[in-house]
Amino acid sequence: CTCDGGVAATGAACTAEGAEICASCSAGFRPVGQGCVANTCTCYAGEAATGAACTTNGAEICGSCSDGFRLEGLICVGVDMGAGACACAEPGRTTVLRDGAGTVLPEVYGGSCEVHNTTAACTDST
């Protein structure tokens, strides 16, 4: 038997000579039918992990981050990108973090800032 992405079945477990029958799958692969297929990861603000680094199919696991982001754990989060990146701490306003294109980032990706370097990104909280 053969097995792309894992260990080929042998002996009685290999029911047809030359068939794609896997006994187990390598890191970064998951069993589908009798074979193994590569996991596919996602990444909101960068390049998704591939191969053995993509340990769970469909998970958000980043291999690298876009400009303005840094890897924190398995995901890319926003970094302080200078003037215009962080909002202000004015009463009645919310603090937001925007990426380089001005898109407001969700909290999980660094959507709140501790550093407030401009009022340009302030938004009304109502």
Image: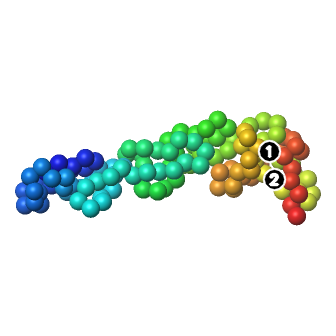
Which residue is more in the foreground, 37 or 115? 37
Q: Residue furthest bottom?
A: 126
Tell me whether circle 1 and circle 2 mark residues in contact (CB < 8 Å).
Answer: yes
Name the kind of residue labelled 1 in the image. Cys
Q: In percent of the image, x 80 and y 45: which residue is there? A: 86
- Across and down, in percent, residue 20 comes to 19, 52
Q: Is residue 4 visible in this depiction of the protein? A: yes
Q: Dot 1 lies on which element? A: loop
User: In the displayed structure, does residue 81 sit left or right of residue 30?
Assistant: right
User: In the displayed structure, does residue 68 sit left or right of residue 30?
Assistant: right
Which residue is more in the foreground, 31 or 85? 31
| Residue that mark 1 sits on | 86
Where, quadrant-wise, is the C terminus in this rendering?
bottom right
- Across and down, in percent, residue 87 comes to 83, 47
Q: Is residue 8 visible in this depiction of the protein? A: no
Q: In percent of the image, x 67 and y 44: which residue is there? A: 78
Q: In percent of the image, x 88 and y 57: which residue is there? A: 124
Going from N to C along the chain, the mark reached first, 1 or 2, is 1
User: In the displayed structure, does residue 7 sit left or right of residue 104?
Assistant: left
| Residue that mark 2 sits on | 95
**Pointer 2 local density, CA inside 10 Å: few below 14, some 14–19, many at least 20:** many
